[in-house]
Amino acid sequence: EAGVTQFPSHSVIEKGQTVTLRCDPISGHDNLYWYRRVMGKEIKFLLHFVKESKQDESGMPNNRFLAERTGGTYSTLKVQPAELEDSGVYFCASSHRAGAFNEQFFGPGTRLTVL
Amino acid sequence: AQSVTQLDSQVPVFEEAPVELRCNYSSSVSVYLFWYVQYPNQGLQLLLKYLSGSTLVKGINGFEAEFNKSQTSFHLRKPSVHISDTAEYFCAVSYILTGGGNKLTFGTGTQLKVEL
């Protein structure tokens, strides 16, 4: 069974540019999550999809971030325009069921550097 | 609000020595606790989890953790570490979101470095 995959693994862009990160969850997992780790701090929740619907996006930093999950399969996270403070590692996770006791399976992350 | 504290950012230890990575949490509701590990250039992998029942939880790779409600702790231990245990370890608390999903609240991570 393939795990959660993320693309690209690294991205280096200049301030003001746009970047789109992609996440492919484990097949059959309806729940998809985005997290971010900035500058060695804690990993923070960004948002949660159930199929194509956003269940909770309380962690999204501001309106420069847009997440989509068309068709309920893969998800994209777009940052437009990127700022220096957006640099960090963006993790995607998926789970079959939603629930506080269900394991979330994580991808390897996308390291974003904004210059 | 829930929070997780990992006081030790780095823990150096010699191979075959025991290790304990500390985790304290705060929560006003029932908690579900997790330890994840991130090896270099890989994603986070679940080591173990506490949902209910026995307070001593055994995980993969010889790790175990003990849930202590009175001390609000969930420390991770291994009696004898190996070079391959060198990685970053994250403690996390899970709780239910309003929409029925759940999110993980992580600590800042502890870098375990095993030396010969």
Image: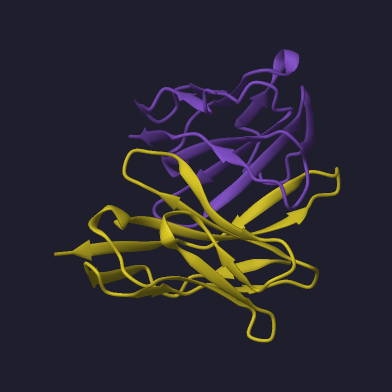
Q: In the rendered image, is residue A25 in sight? A: yes
Q: Residue at x 35, y 46 (%)?
A: B39
Query: Within the image, what quadrant is residue A10 found in?
Result: top left
Which residue, as the protein is rendered here, is positioned at the far bottom? B70
Which residue, as the protein is rendered here, is positioned at the far left? B116
Q: Give the colour scheme shown.
A: by chain
- Percent position (x, y) of residue A98? 77, 41
- Percent position (x, y) of residue A12? 34, 28
Image quadrant in which the N terminus of chain A is located: top right
Q: In the rendered image, is residue A13 in sight? A: no
**Is A113 drawn above or below residue B92 in the view shown?**
above
Residue A53 appears left or right of A5: right
Which tint is chain A? purple
Q: Which residue is drawn at 73% across and 71% down?
A: B27
**Is B12 drawn above or below residue A70 in the view shown?**
below
Residue A51 appears left or right of B79: right
Query: Within the image, what quadrant is residue B28 found in?
Result: bottom right
In front here: B5 or A38?
A: B5
- Percent position (x, y) of residue B61? 41, 55
Image quadrant in which the C terminus of chain A is located: top left
Q: Tag count in the figure?
A: 0
Residue B3 appears left or right of B39: right
Q: Residue at x 60, y 25 (%)?
A: A25
Query: Within the image, what quadrant is residue B72 found in?
Result: bottom right
Which residue, as the protein is rendered here, is positioned at the far top? A71
Which tint is chain B? yellow
- Percent position (x, y) of residue B79? 37, 73
